[in-house]
């Protein structure tokens, strides 16, 4: 595995690095409700070539609340699919079947199947870390998601707001498109917090 320190933020289930869609072991642990060290352990035990590991699992670090350097893996789509196929966990069966029928599906689409099949409560959340610096995202566990964001980014969350809705994915997508001209990067937007909150409430 390649070892690269990462001081940037893990903002979503899937991000693009050098034009390639990747997720992280932290996000996989959050979606699957597993301990992160167990995800790392399972990937370490998988039987695959060293070259496959180098190409698809990149070892990085983040700082914990105790200011300790902690490891996590940046994972490509191919690496994520290998995880699905190799790890013995019945909870992943819906995702395996979805991928078997939709081999061109993206990682976030595969992950979404697992979330929706289990009928988890998804929330759309807004957070503000500075004036006109707002993130619009979704999570099934907002408290844990925000904790992860603070741990990995170094940002202090000044204000937050969220709603739980069966169409959370569609609402998030709508808001991202609505504020597209104000996009900074990823899920971050250069907009007032109150404006984002008003837009979210007006959809409901």
Image: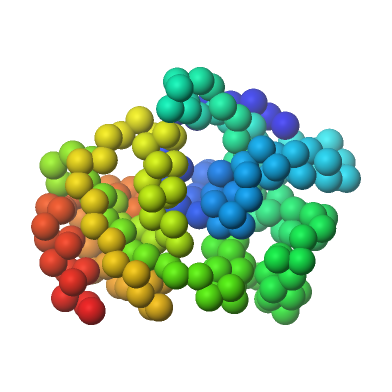
Q: Position of residue 148 (x, y in %)?
A: 44, 41
Give x and y (percent) for residue 97: 74, 75
Residue 109, compared with residue 30, is above or below; it is below
The answer to whether residue 201 is above or below residue 21 is below
Residue at 13%, 67% (x, y): give it: 198
Say which of 30 and 171 sits in front: 30
State whether residue 175 is above or below residue 56.
below
Percent across and percent down for residue 175 are: 27, 67
Q: Residue at x 18, y 72 (%)?
A: 201
Whether residue 93 is visible to the viewer of this picture, yes or no, is yes
Give the side of residue 11 with respect to residue 26, left or right. Answer: left
Tell me where residue 172 sits by quadrant.
bottom left
Q: Is residue 156 left or right of residue 91?
A: left
| Identity of the residue drawn at 22% across and 77% down | 203
Q: Quadrant for residue 199, please give it.
A: bottom left
Quadrant containing the N terminus in the rendered view = top right
How many marks can you see?
Answer: 0
Query: Looking at the picture, how far across and down is residue 60, in whole percent?
Result: 58, 30
Which residue is more in the foreground, 95 or 38?
38
């Amino acid at each position: 595995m390649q070892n690269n320190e990462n001081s940037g933020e893990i903002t979503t289930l899937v991000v693009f690095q050098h034009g390639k869609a990747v997720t992280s072991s932290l996000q996989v642990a959050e979606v699957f409700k597993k301990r992160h060290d167990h995800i790392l352990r399972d990937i370490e035990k998988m039987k695959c070539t060293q070259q496959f590991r180098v190409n698809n699992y990149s070892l990085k670090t983040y700082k914990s609340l105790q200011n300790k350097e902690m490891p996590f893996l940046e994972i490509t789509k191919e690496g994520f699919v290998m995880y699905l196929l190799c790890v013995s966990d019945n909870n992943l069966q819906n995702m395996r079947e979805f991928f078997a029928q939709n081999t061109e599906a993206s990682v976030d689409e595969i992950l979404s199947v697992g979330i929706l099949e289990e009928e988890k409560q998804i929330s759309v959340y807004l957070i503000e870390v500075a004036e006109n610096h707002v993130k619009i995202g979704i999570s099934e566990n907002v408290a844990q998601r925000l904790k992860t964001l603070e741990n990995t980014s170094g940002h202090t969350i000044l204000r937050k707001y969220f709603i739980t809705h069966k169409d959370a994915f569609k609402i998030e997508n709508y808001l991202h498109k609505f504020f597209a001209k104000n996009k900074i990067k990823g899920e971050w937007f250069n907009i007032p917090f109150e404006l984002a909150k008003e837009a979210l409430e007006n959809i409901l």
